[in-house]
Amino acid sequence: MNVASGGPAMMQRLIHILWPSFLVAGAADIVFTTLVDPLNIVYDGEALFDDRIGAYTFGFFVFWLLGIASSATTCYFQRSADEINRCPLPPPDRPEGCPKRDTGGCC
């Protein structure tokens, strides 16, 4: 994989998203484990979980998904205007009438 295909940059972005969300999920799971007994969580008269370990595992993954969503949103909004507006095609492959076809620039 080279940089042009997004290899190392994509891997770095994934690390920036997954690692902090994993740490936050671990901390949230510690708080959840300390404060909540999942066997007491009832919906419609029935317990949602039969096993504490399963409930804590499920909680960890839910917290991790929430952290991933938060970190991914942050990475999304950190992009510069150049990254957002960059044309992925080289100038000769751009469609007819594209203002960036001949100059390769924005004008």
Image (spheres, grey):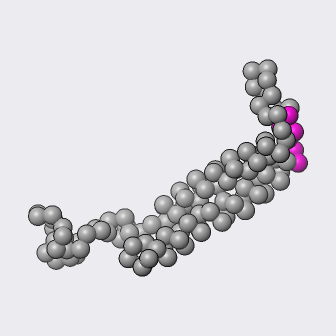
Give yes or no for residue 38 being in the magenta stretch: yes
Name the side, left or right, on which 57 lies relative to 95: right
Q: Residue furthest top?
A: 45
Where residue 24 appears, as percent x and y from the top left, is 72, 59
Instruction: Tell me which residue sits at (73%, 62%) in the image.
Output: 23
Q: Which residues are magenta?
A: 34-39
In this view of the protein, can residue 7 be seen by the observer?
Answer: yes
**In this rendering, is residue 28 above or below 45?**
below
> Considering depth in this image, is 1 or 4 the residue closer to the camera?
1
- Position of the N terminus, as image quadrant, is bottom left
| Left or right position of 104 against 7 | left
Q: Position of residue 36 (x, y in %)?
A: 85, 41
User: In the image, is residue 50 above or below residue 79?
Assistant: above
Residue shown at 43% from the left, 72% from the top: 6
**In the picture shown, does residue 54 fall above or below 47?**
below
| Dominant secondary-structure state across the stretch colored magenta | helix
**As drawn, 82 above or below 30:** below
Q: Quadrant of residue 97?
A: bottom left
Q: Is residue 107 visible?
A: no
Q: Residue drawn 59% across and 69% down?
A: 15
